[in-house]
Image: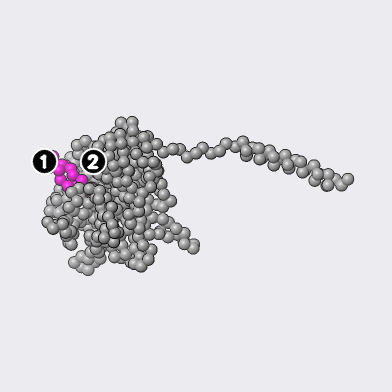
């Protein structure tokens, strides 16, 4: 018999054995464990207040307790959340045990177009949640609603930087049309029809020399009588506000707080703080700034800045308060004066104690994108 033919006949059962052995091994291979169940009661026994602040990591949204040692994922998307520390706004309505929260943010998707990548128009999202005895009521993850989506037709534009009003019934957004016409709009929540729920608050601004300025980072004041934002004509930046008159109309001309050329698209935070211990809490603004080559935060006494006073930047022990970091957010869940949450190096959440000046690290999270406290 031909030797090659014999080898071929012998190889057939060997191959069959190998195939059967492999199939058996695959059959015995354990299945991957199911995705862990998200527990809405995971932070119920936290020593510190929950839910104190919200933050993002990549494309996922988390609620955290005040100490940062317990967090619950509440939403995940295929889109990019935020894109800057400002693009996230959270309000809490309740006490230390129960209440409801509202979060708004912007999402944007990076899509491949032929051989390049391009950002598609963004959408403004809105998420409601309730907590009873420190336990999240809804099934997790929670499905948010779309408050607004930028059109992909003429006029081409985008929307971003949402800020939820302290009363929780409206949202401020910044945006542009035709890549140059910047604006600030206000959108009413739970309103219909949609075309009657969106109002133009402020349009593009031209200074006395004919220079056009973009608008960025609108924020309500705590009493909702002012809107703070930045006017930008790079490298010049003007931190300003508009305010309501006795008829409820917004002023057309912005009031200047600070004029500078070393800011890095500063999206700040507004709060009250009796920083001079005179028994009166002044309106203060945590203002991101580029200072001596690093990203930093200074705290401004708004009225002192408007008056051109030398103590415009709040100080401690005779020196201006300069904090290395960005994405500041005043807290409202701490006793006494507020503290200031902020990001540092895209990896850590830190808290600045306004009373003592002490900074503590709450949490180290690689890929952190934004943070916002329960204002």
Residue 147 at what x, y percent from top left? 32, 54
Residue 174 lies, with reference to residue 139, above or below; the image says: below
Give the total of numbered labels: 2
Q: Earlier in the sequence, mark 2 or mark 1?
A: 1
| Closest to the observer, 311 or 338 | 338
Residue at point 41% right, 49% down? 77
Residue 278 at what x, y percent from top left? 11, 41
Residue 195 lies, with reference to residue 107, above or below; the image says: below
Residue at point 33% right, 50% down? 126
Residue 141 at what x, y percent from top left? 40, 43
Residue 137 at what x, y percent from top left? 34, 39
Circle 1 residue: 278
| Closest to the observer, 110 or 340 | 110
Most distant residue in the right direction: 1
Q: Is residue 357 left or right of residue 7?
A: left
Residue at point 69% right, 42% down? 19
**Looking at the rendering, in which quadrant would you find the N terminus?**
top right
Q: Is residue 309 left or right of residue 131?
A: left
| Closer mark to the observer between disc 2 and disc 1 | 2
Circle 2 residue: 332
Magenta stretch in the rendered image: 271-286
As helix, strand or loop, the secondary structure at mark 1 comes to loop
Most distant residue in the front direction: 192
As helix, strand or loop, the secondary structure at mark 2 comes to loop
Instruction: Judge whether residue 282 is colored magenta.
Output: yes
Dividing the picture into quadrants, the one containing residue 354 is: top left
**Looking at the rendering, in which quadrant would you find the C terminus?**
top left
């Amino acid at each position: 018999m031909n030797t090659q033919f014999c080898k071929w006949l012998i190889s057939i059962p060997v191959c069959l054995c190998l195939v059967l052995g492999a199939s058996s091994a695959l059959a015995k291979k354990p299945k991957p464990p199911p995705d862990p169940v998200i527990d809405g009661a995971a932070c119920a026994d936290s020593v510190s207040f929950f839910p104190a602040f919200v933050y993002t990591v990549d494309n996922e949204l988390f609620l955290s307790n005040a100490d940062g040692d317990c967090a619950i994922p509440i939403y995940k998307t295929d889109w990019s959340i935020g894109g800057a520390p400002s693009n996230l706004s959270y309000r809490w309505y309740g006490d230390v045990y129960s209440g409801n929260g509202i979060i708004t943010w912007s999402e944007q998707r990076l899509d491949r177009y032929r051989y390049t990548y391009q950002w598609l128009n963004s959408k403004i999202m809105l998420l409601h949640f309730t907590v009873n005895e420190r336990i999240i009521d809804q099934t997790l993850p929670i499905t948010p609603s779309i408050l607004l989506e930028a059109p992909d037709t003429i006029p081409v534009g985008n929307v971003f930087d949402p800020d939820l009003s302290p009363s929780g019934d409206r949202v401020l957004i910044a945006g542009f049309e035709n890549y140059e016409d910047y604006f600030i709009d206000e959108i009413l929540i739970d309103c219909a029809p949609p075309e009657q729920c969106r109002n133009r608050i402020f349009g593009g601004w031209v200074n006395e020399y004919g220079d056009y300025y973009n608008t960025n980072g609108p924020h309500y004041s705590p009493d909702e009588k002012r809107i703070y934002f930045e006017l930008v004509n790079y490298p010049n930046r003007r931190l300003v506000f508009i305010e309501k008159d006795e008829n409820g109309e917004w002023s057309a001309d912005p009031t200047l707080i600070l004029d500078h050329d070393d800011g890095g698209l500063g999206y700040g935070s507004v709060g009250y703080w009796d920083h001079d211990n005179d028994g009166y809490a002044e309106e203060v603004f945590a203002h991101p700034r580029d200072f001596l080559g690093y990203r930093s935060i200074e705290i401004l006494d708004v009225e002192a800045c408007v008056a051109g006073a030398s103590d415009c930047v709040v100080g401690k022990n005779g020196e201006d308060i300069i904090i290395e970091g960005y994405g500041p957010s005043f807290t409202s869940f701490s006793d006494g004066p507020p503290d200031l949450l902020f990001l540092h190096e895209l990896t850590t959440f830190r808290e600045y104690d306004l009373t003592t000046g002490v900074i503590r690290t709450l949490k180290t999270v690689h890929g952190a994108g934004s943070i916002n406290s329960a204002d």
